[in-house]
Image: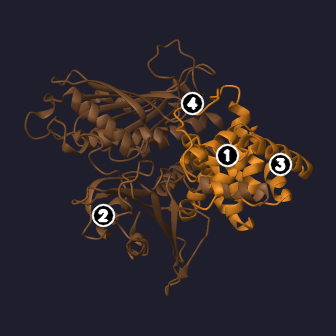
């Protein structure tokens, strides 16, 4: 219970980025992840870093979910009711990031989250996603190009010291 | 700064805006984990046929099962004082307020709500309410129905107990714990079809409550295409909503003050607003206020000039570190003056990062809101006063 309570916040933030802001789905993914960790608890002593392992389980759960249900999902092209961009630390600008993430394929999004939110190496990212390092590099390059194109100058606004 | 570094910072900023009720998430996870483990063990022991029996049995035990008197879930059947279970009096307006307040306390984001409700003055006739709203992704609808019943009524057991797994018409069905018989189920639709998630709850006070949502856009008929595979609102939140509705009625059959308050007249959960109000200098008169679970704001006014200042405080997970000083207890403090959005508007911002990682950020604008025109030459509160507030140890107690 302590592990679950301690990790739930961080896992939810990762899940929110992976789902590009779908908090309901993110909560489901976190619960699924922690429930799987619960079933592994007896073997946990053999896992070097349970927190990192939980993140890996989360990403795999997300990718499995996307693979299984992507045909039935109909993501909206635009976020409804998004307010117009305002000041530098306005939520609308963060919504722009979430919108840009949403336009990435799920695996590319997972690479971005693992590499730039989790600060994982290419090799760790490849290991978490069960793909080759080369595939991670390719996806990373492609995702960054897409985000750069999509966010353009607004990313500078997002990080301008407020 | 390389784009990758910028992206990392923005991701951290954005992720920091998502907050969780960690305890309920953890509890939900453990419940799922136990079920998963029970299913696995059962299937290992004796194959799938036995597994169905064991899971069904475990479900009944979780819900309290039947005691020797045949009562479900340990519910008391003592009739309430007064008119027993035959009295029911609730207006349509009460039902609207109960549903809207319940959505707020359940942590469900609601934009542009449209409410419809019917009251009831007869025990046999249900009172209903529905809310159509934007949930940030698409339109959604939640419906509520409340009926007065005798909780000892044997016929009600069927409504609140899951059928055996093999015969179940539901995709998921759990008889839930608590000293209330709570049922959450998923009504299976065709692949890619419309699904309804509902929680049916029999309260010890004598109410049969059902809250439900589905995966189609609101204000439409049954021919509508599903928006997502599953309804966006998870069963846990529906269950929380059902429990709030139960608390909104008295055992005597009438609405209590809990749910029928005019929505929006009370601060939302969280300690930030009360703490902010408590820490404000006494000379400031609070004109209006508001709050969420992670922050609060007040608008203070000067009775002589009529100028107003917007002051907001919140816990953030930022990484734009700009500190001017470090206090003796290790708390880093950053004080800045920034231009506001409108001409002449000044934003005073003070950040305090404690050694335990708690980062409090407080800002004051010489305007009634961050986007309004200026109201006075400077905020009605000084940077030094903001610093006193930001570095208060009271924030360590904030939820």
Q: Which chain is painted in orange?
A: A
The numbered mark at residue B230 is 4
Q: Can residue B3 be spotted in the picture?
A: yes
In this rendering, which labeled residue sits more in front, label 1 or label 4? 1
- Decide which of B222, B289 is in the foreground and name it: B289
Relative vertical location of residue B78 with respect to residue B346 in this rendering, above or below: above
Image marks 2 and 3: residues in contact by CB distance under 8 Å: no
Q: Which mark is residue B277?
A: 2
Mark toward the start of the polypeptide (1 vs 3): 1
The local crowd at label 2, few if under 14, some if 14 to 19, many if 20 or more residues have their Cα within 10 Å, is some
Residue A146 appears at what percent x and percent y?
79, 41
Q: How far apart are labels 2 and 1 at the CA level?
A: 37 Å
Q: Which chain comes out brown in the rendered image?
A: B
Q: From what the image shows, is residue A36 above or below residue B169?
A: below
Front residue of this view, candidates B326 and B376: B376
Badge 3 is on which residue?
A140
Label 4 is found on which chain of the structure? B
State whether discs 1 and 3 lie on one chain: yes
Residue under numbered circle 1:
A18
Task: Characterize the local packing of mark 3: few (<14), some (14-19) or many (20 or more) Cα atoms within 10 angstroms.
Answer: many
Which residue is rendered at x = 71% and y = 26% of the image? A71
**CB under 8 Å between callouts 2 and 1?**
no
**Drawn side of residue B280 relative to residue A81, left or right:** left
Name the chain letter of the residue that bears numbered label 3: A
Q: Is residue B247 left or right of residue A156?
A: left
Q: Secondary structure at mark 4?
A: loop
Can I make out residue B35 in this image?
Answer: no
Label 1: which secondary element:
helix
Q: Residues within 10 Å of mark 1 (few under 14, many from 20)?
A: many
Q: Quadrant of the C terminus of chain B?
A: bottom left
**Residue under disc 2 on the same chain as residue under disc 4:** yes
């Amino acid at each position: 219970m302590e592990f679950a309570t301690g990790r739930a916040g961080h896992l939810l933030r990762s899940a929110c980025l992976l789902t590009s802001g779908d908090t309901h789905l993110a909560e489901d993914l976190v619960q699924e992840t922690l429930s799987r960790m619960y079933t592994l608890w007896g073997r946990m002593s053999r896992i070097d870093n349970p927190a990192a392992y939980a993140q890996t389980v989360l990403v795999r759960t997300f990718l499995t979910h996307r693979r299984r249900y992507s045909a039935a999902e109909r993501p909206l092209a635009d976020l409804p009711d998004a307010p117009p961009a305002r000041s530098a630390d306005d939520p609308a600008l963060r919504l722009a990031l979430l919108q840009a993430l949403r336009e990435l394929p799920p695996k590319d999004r997972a690479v971005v989250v693992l590499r730039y939110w989790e600060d994982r190496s290419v090799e760790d990212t490849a290991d978490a996603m069960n793909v080759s390092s080369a595939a991670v590099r390719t996806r990373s390059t492609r995702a960054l190009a897409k985000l750069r194109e999509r966010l353009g100058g607004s990313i500078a606004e997002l990080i301008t010291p407020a | 700064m390389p784009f990758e570094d910028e992206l990392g910072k923005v991701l951290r900023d954005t992720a920091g805006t998502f907050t969780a009720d960690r305890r309920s998430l953890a509890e939900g996870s453990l419940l799922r984990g136990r079920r998963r483990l029970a299913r696995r063990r059962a299937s290992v022991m004796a194959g799938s046929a036995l597994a169905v029996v064991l899971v069904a049995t475990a479900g009944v035990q979780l819900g309290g099962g039947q005691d020797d008197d045949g009562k479900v879930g340990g519910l008391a059947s003592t009739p309430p004082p007064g008119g027993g279970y035959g009295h029911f009096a609730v207006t349509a307006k009460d039902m609207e307020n109960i549903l809207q307040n319940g959505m707020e306390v359940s942590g469900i984001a609601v934009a542009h709500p449209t409410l419809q409700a019917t009251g009831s003055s007869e025990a046999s006739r249900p009172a209903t309410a529905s809310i159509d709203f934007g949930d940030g992704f698409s339109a959604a609808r939640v419906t509520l129905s409340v009926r007065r019943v005798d909780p000892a009524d044997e016929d009600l057991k069927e409504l609140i107990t899951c059928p055996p797994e093999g015969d179940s018409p539901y995709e998921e069905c759990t008889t839930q714990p608590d000293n209330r018989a709570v049922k959450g189920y998923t009504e299976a639709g065709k692949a890619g079809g419309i699904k309804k998630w509902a929680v049916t709850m029999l309260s010890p006070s004598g109410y049969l409550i059902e809250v439900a949502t589905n995966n189609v856009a609101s204000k439409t008929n049954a021919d509508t295409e599903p928006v997502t595979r599953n309804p966006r609102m998870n069963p846990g939140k529906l269950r929380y909503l059902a429990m709030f509705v139960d608390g909104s009625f008295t055992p005597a059959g009438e609405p209590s003050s809990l749910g029928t308050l005019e929505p929006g007249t009370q601060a939302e959960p969280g300690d930030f607003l009360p703490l902010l109000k408590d820490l404000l200098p006494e000379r400031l008169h609070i004109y209006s206020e508001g709050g969420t679970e992670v922050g609060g704001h007040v608008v203070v006014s000067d009775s002589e000039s009529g100028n107003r200042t917007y002051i907001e405080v919140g816990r953030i997970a930022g990484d734009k570190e700009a500190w001017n000083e470090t206090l003796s207890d290790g708390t880093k403090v950053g004080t800045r003056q920034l231009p506001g959005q409108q001409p002449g508007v000044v934003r005073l911002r003070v950040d305090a990062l404690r050694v335990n990682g708690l980062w409090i950020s407080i800002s004051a604008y010489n305007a009634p809101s961050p986007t309004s025109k200026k109201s006075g030459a400077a905020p009605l509160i000084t940077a030094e006063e903001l610093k006193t507030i930001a570095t208060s140890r009271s924030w360590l107690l904030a939820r």
